[in-house]
Structures are given as structure tokens and as C-alpha cells.
Image (tube, grey):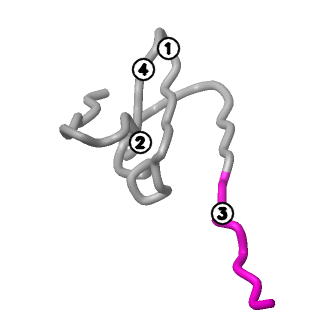
Amino acid sequence: MKIPIKPNQMVTASVLGSSLKLNYCGLERAIIFLNEQYAVGTLEVKVVHPLPKYDV
């Protein structure tokens, strides 16, 4: 798997051994990374939403 690296941006993906870790990576970008890839194992997804804004 080739991971594109852009200057002055957070690292979005890294490979360590047989594991792929995605950070600061939106769903659309993750789909691009994983397109046409084959893997066996587990998948863990953590979705973080911004805090809701309340008018007081």
C-alpha cells in the first residue's frame, strides 16, 4: 500500500508490520486508501463529531 505524504499536513495513515492505522482521516479518504485492498482481520472505527452548539 502506498501512502501519499503531503508537506505540512498531519499523517493520515501509517503501516506498522501487518497493521494499517488511519488518523485524522475522513471516511472518503479512507475509502480511497482501502480501494481494491484485501485484508483479513478486524476493523475498529471511531467516529468523532464536533460538540453541538447550543444557543443560551
Say which element carries label 1. loop
Q: Secondary structure at mark 2?
A: helix
The quadrant of the rendering that contains the N terminus is: top left
41 or 10, which lies in front? 10
Which residue in the structure is indicated by mark 4? 15
Q: Which residue is mark 1?
A: 18
Image check: 45 left or right of 19?
right
- Whether the residues at callouts 2 and 1 have beta carbons within 8 Å, the answer is no
The disc at residue 48 is none
Residue, x 66% and y 55% (percent of image)? 48
The magenta segment is: 47-56
Q: Amino acid at mark 1?
A: Ser
Left/right placement of residue 54 relative to residue 25 reads right
Marks 2 and 1 sit apart, C-alpha to C-alpha, by 14 Å
Q: Nearer the viewer, mark 1 or mark 3?
A: 3
Ranked by sequence position, the earlier of labels 2 and 1 is 1
Location of mark 3 (residue) = 49
Q: Amino acid at mark 4?
A: Val
Residue 22, percent across and down?
Answer: 49, 36
Task: Check whether the beta carbons of the residues at disc 1 and disc 3 lie within 8 A of each other.
Answer: no
Q: Earlier in the sequence, mark 4 or mark 3?
A: 4
Q: Using the numbered discs, state the Cα–Cα distance from disc 1 to disc 4 in whole angstroms.
A: 7 Å
Q: Quadrant of the C terminus?
A: bottom right
> Please, is residue 51 above or below residue 32 in the view?
below
Please name whichever residue, 38 or 29, is drawn nearer the observer in this view of the structure. Answer: 29
Q: Secondary structure at mark 4?
A: strand
First in residue order: circle 2 vs circle 4: 4
Q: Which mark is residue 34?
A: 2
Say which quarter of the image contains residue 47.
bottom right
Kindly check if marks 3 and 2 are in contact, taking CB atoms under 8 A apart as contact.
no
Residue 51 pos. (x, y %)? 70, 67
